[in-house]
Image (cartoon, coloured by chain):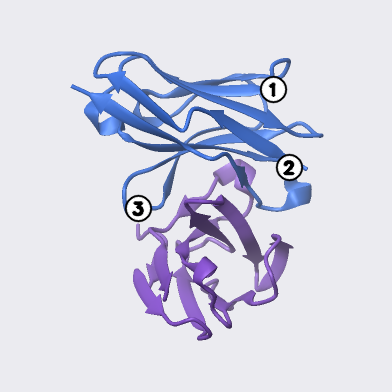
Amino acid sequence: AQSVTQLGSHVSVSEGALVLLRCNYSSSVPPYLFWYVQYPNQGLQLLLKYTTGATLVKGINGFEAEFKKSETSFHLTKPSAHMSDAAEYFCAVSDGKAAGNKLTFGGGTRVLVKP
Amino acid sequence: KAGVTQTPRYLIKTRGQQVTLSCSPISGHRSVSWYQQTPGQGLQFLFEYFSETQRNKGNFPGRFSGRQFSNSRSEMNVSTLELGDSALYLCASSRDGLFNYGYTFGSGTRLTVV
């Protein structure tokens, strides 16, 4: 069975500071990894995904994540936080097509951006 | 390009009733998945449909069911509602594979059971 752990349910950062959201996963097969963002009263928006290939993945809105197999991690970063980054972020894993289109999500990290 | 449309946006039902939620995927998308989001359990996979066939199912009781029509629109039904079914229900569509195209999520239907 797969699982995803997001360290820190809440993160507070100052505008312009580095955003670092941590995600560790458990998977018995090579994982496919995703980061989604959710704004209040909205659905989930895909930030970036890792399936195969380059382990450093660049996404939308200046976010990027690095897949580290040895650490079973897929941390999300953004060099400089903007007020519009305040939202909840979810890391998710899928173990490939055998599971169909099923995602297992972490518990989420709510980001607060201070002016 | 229209996104994933879920109707209704908000719903209040009484315990014991049943409810049907609707999801219209992006044009050309054949895969539709449903997720339940609650403060306690987070985001949990309900089921996925592809070309009118259920391709995958999560660990939910039989009260939760779904279907997909030939135009790819999907409905999910919850019978004999319980207070714990109160949640945001999210629908997501994909052209085919999650891995090549990813999901596009709708804004969800917020169900409140009283």
Q: Residue A72's mark?
A: 1
Q: Residue B79's mark?
A: none
How far, Cα to Cα, is label 1 from label 2?
16 Å
Mark 2 burial class by Cα count in 10 Å: few <14, some 14-19, many 20+: some
**Residue B7 placed where, x, y %?**
38, 73
Query: Which chain does the numbered disc 2 sit on?
Result: A
Left or right: residue B110 compared with residue A80: right
Query: Does residue B18 show up?
Result: yes
Instruction: Give the structural element (helix, strand or loop) at label 2.
Output: loop
Task: Compare residues A87 and A49 and report the one nearer the observer.
Answer: A87
Task: Compare residues B65 and B74 and report the one nearer the observer.
Answer: B65
Q: Colour of chain A?
A: blue
Marks 1/2 same chain: yes
Task: Compare residues A88 and A55 and report the one nearer the observer.
Answer: A88
Query: Which chain does the numbered disc 3 sit on?
Result: A
Instruction: Give the structural element (helix, strand or loop) at label 1.
Output: loop
| Mark 3 touches mark 1? (CB < 8 Å) | no
